[in-house]
Image (cartoon, helix red, strand yellow):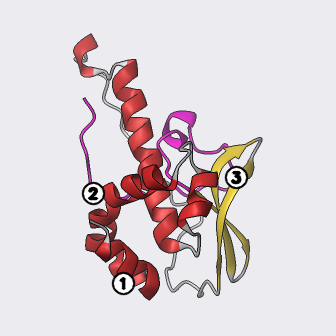
Amino acid sequence: MARKSNAHMFLIGQDGKDIDKALRALCTVFVHKSALTQAKIFKTIKDRQGEDLMGRLDGVPPTDIHFKTYDEGKFIFDDEDKDEDDFASKEEFENFKQEKEDEKLAAVYAFTDRSMSDMVAFSDYTSKSTVREKIKQHKDELLDEDADLIDDNKLKTLQNMR
């Protein structure tokens, strides 16, 4: 069964397909740095292009992180001694996938200037009340980990959600 985690993982690729499909399925948003100081946030990737634009970030500051171009991370997928019970069922996977979509919804709401109505258009939900409930379910994670990155007005809205 999938466990809830507050850990974040950032997968950085050169295009939409150099990260394995199984890992891309777990991604909550896709960011394309379209200019030196601008990035676009997409809901999905298709044919190596972002789709369903969710928002834009302007004024992206330069990085002070030094990196090695050919530095590669090592992943070990241990498949020894696995039996059928160790794998998630289709229902568990679908629930996990929906949970990630809901986390994405909350993050995009918190970090962009999108309104609750805008979020309905970007989600699979049909009402603002459902979208609000899904955002409310993830607000504590956002407030605990990223409150300093959230616009003051959105921060107040999230803090007042009951």
Q: Tell me if residue 22 is in the magenta stretch.
A: yes
Give the mark, 3 or 2, whose residue is nearer the N terminus: 2
| Count of labels in the image | 3
Using the rendered view, name the quadrant where residue 135 is placed: bottom left
Residues tagged 3 and 2 counted as in contact (Cβ below 8 A): no
Image coordinates of residue 96 in percent, x first then y, are: 37, 36
Amino acid tagged 1 = Asp
Comparing marks 3 and 2, which lies closer to the viewer?
3
Which class describes the residues within 10 Å of circle 2: few (<14), some (14-19), or many (20+)? few
Depth order, front residue of 37/83:
37
Give the mark, 1 or 3, whose residue is nearer the N terminus: 3
Q: Label 1, on which residue?
A: 148
| Extent of the magenta region | 1-29
Q: Is residue 25 left or right of residue 137?
A: right
Give the structural element (helix, strand or loop) at label 3.
strand
Measuring 37% from the left and 54% from the top, which residue is drawn there? 133
Measuring 30% from the left and 29% from the top, which residue is drawn there? 78
Give the mark, 2 or 1, whose residue is nearer the N terminus: 2
Image coordinates of residue 153 in percent, x first then y, are: 45, 84
Amino acid tagged 3 = Asp
Image coordinates of residue 76 in percent, x first then y, are: 36, 38
Q: Quadrant of the N terminus?
A: top left
Q: Label 2, on which residue?
A: 6
Using the rendered view, name the quadrant where residue 19 is placed: top right
Measuring 64% from the left and 87% from the top, which residue is drawn there? 59
* Residue 143 versus residue 122 in the image, above or below: below
Amino acid tagged 2 = Asn
Q: CA distance from mark 2 to mark 1?
A: 17 Å
Query: Residue 52 — which label?
Result: 3
Q: Tell me if residue 18 is in the magenta stretch.
A: yes
Q: CA distance from mark 1 to mark 3?
A: 27 Å
Image coordinates of residue 10 in percent, x first then y, are: 46, 59
